[in-house]
Image (tube, grey):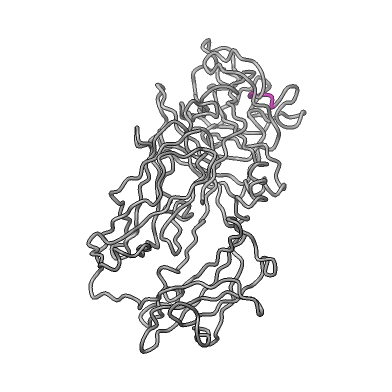
Amino acid sequence: MGIRRYIASQDTIITNGYDYTLTTRGTGSNMGYADSLEVYSISGQTSSSAKGKSQELARTLVQFPIATLSSDRTAGSLPASGNVSFFLRLFNVETAFTLPQDFSLNIHAVSQSWSEGTGLDMEEYSDIGTANWMKRSAGNIWGPAASPDIGGHYNSLPVYSASFAKGPEDLEIDISPTVERWMSGTLANNGLIIKLPDTLEAYYSSSTGNDTSGAIQNTVGSIDTYYTKRFSARSSQYFFKRPTIEARWDSRTMDNRENFYYSSSNAPAIDNRNRLYYYNYVKGRLVNIPAVGTGSIFVSLYSGSTAPTGSKLLLHNGKTHVTGGYVSRGVYSASLCITASTTPLQAMFDVWYSGTTQYFTGSLYPELMPRYGVAPTFNKATSAVYLKKSYSRKDTSRFRFFVRDKNWSPTVYTVSTAKNPTDIITSASYTIKRVTDTFAAVPYGTGSTYHTFLSYDGDGNYFDLDMSLLEAGYMYKIKLSYYNDSIGGWIEQPEEFKFRVTE
């Protein structure tokens, strides 16, 4: 399971925009309970000979439960720093107002604490309270008391930038450096501010750039209007549209027990390498081997028909064993290669041991590396194994699949065998869509993070899913895509696997 989501714990809008009278600024207004978040710049609705054309701005503040992320990392639910990416996701709200185009938004960490507030009025700014443009919380202004930094006090670095070519795009950007600093305690978690760049706001932090009324002086001439970009707030009725930090990581287990190949001189070293796993289940749960813990374990291969016989086989390293290591609680792995003899062995046995104690003996059936004179045909049929009709949001569930060539013609032996071998798809990804409107509740993650890639082991391809990612009361469908190396692209499979989610 390579994806977890954390919904915002606070969000609000702060603005110095005029109300409908165009005489009173909403600098004291609070919109902490509004169901959308807003960023805009309006130039020239009114003017003053002392300050030039007026500048009206709105910025968004959002904060996330970083303590929960830290707890999940301690519990092992999140990988260590450097092995996981954190993406800020904000979702566009359709609005009757004109959308700005071809602009960008900057995202900064906020340097001071603030209160969300309970205001709702985004039109007349009648709900007075904090946080607002002038104050971050009751009795506390933004920035140093002697020189208030109106409109939120934020750290200049790091600055993240998100671009919007047409206007209705969602915001999705990797903010891992800031999240890691929050989690390590080197940066106070006061959330983020989402705003137009200073050059589009005509904003200056010097005393000549603002005054105590919350106005910003236009000192750079004509400034374009960017009105208005809205995102769903955490109070939105739409489950999948709330502000989110999405943790993504490559959680794949790539166990070659079912697709173990002899080394080939035609293949590069990485393709000759086979990785085997040992899962130490005790009373149905994974536990570390007491004498091994998180240390090293050794693996040797033997020939045999039904059990290991004879001497250890010689491996790629010139030795009769390789050193394996700890992966996670109760899981160990080792990487090895072996060259086929003149008469290749049909079966091998992997023995895991430390010192004189043997902990596990597995079996595998190696194959010669396939060779093709032309590009191979990639035509698969996939079925879901043990798919249930419904799943609870409280569960983490495993979805497993059986894959074969569509033109597979089983023999009498394979039909009568209880466990038929499955094809292993080494690059496979999943998406989960809501059936009613095909909304992608979990989109394909085929980029750099691999967070929706399927694992594989001796029983085939699978993935684990935290069902709390999905909203209860709906039916969903799983779609799979397989990567075809011969064409260098992904092929979405025709099958759909449906299930319902309950509380």
Residue under the point 53% across and 47% down: 174
Q: Which residues are magenta?
A: 132-136
What is the x, y in percent for residue 361?
53, 73
Q: How many marks?
A: 0
Pick the front one: 314 or 214: 314
Kindly indicate the quadrant of the structure image that contains residue 207. top right
Kindly indicate the quadrant of the structure image that contains residue 189. top right
Residue under the point 58% across and 49% down: 176
What is the x, y in percent for residue 193?
59, 35
* Residue 135 belongs to magenta span: yes
Kindly indicate the quadrant of the structure image that contains residue 220. top right
What is the x, y in percent for residue 333?
55, 68
Q: Is residue 62 above or below residue 487?
A: above
- Furthest-right residue in view? 146
- Furthest-bottom residue in view? 342
What is the x, y in percent for residue 232?
49, 29
Q: Is residue 309 above or below residue 334?
A: below
Residue under the point 43% across and 80% down: 305
- Specify the principal SS of the magenta part: loop
Pick the front one: 452 or 368: 368
Residue under the point 41% across and 68% down: 258
Pick the front one: 182 or 14: 182
* Residue 337 belongs to magenta span: no
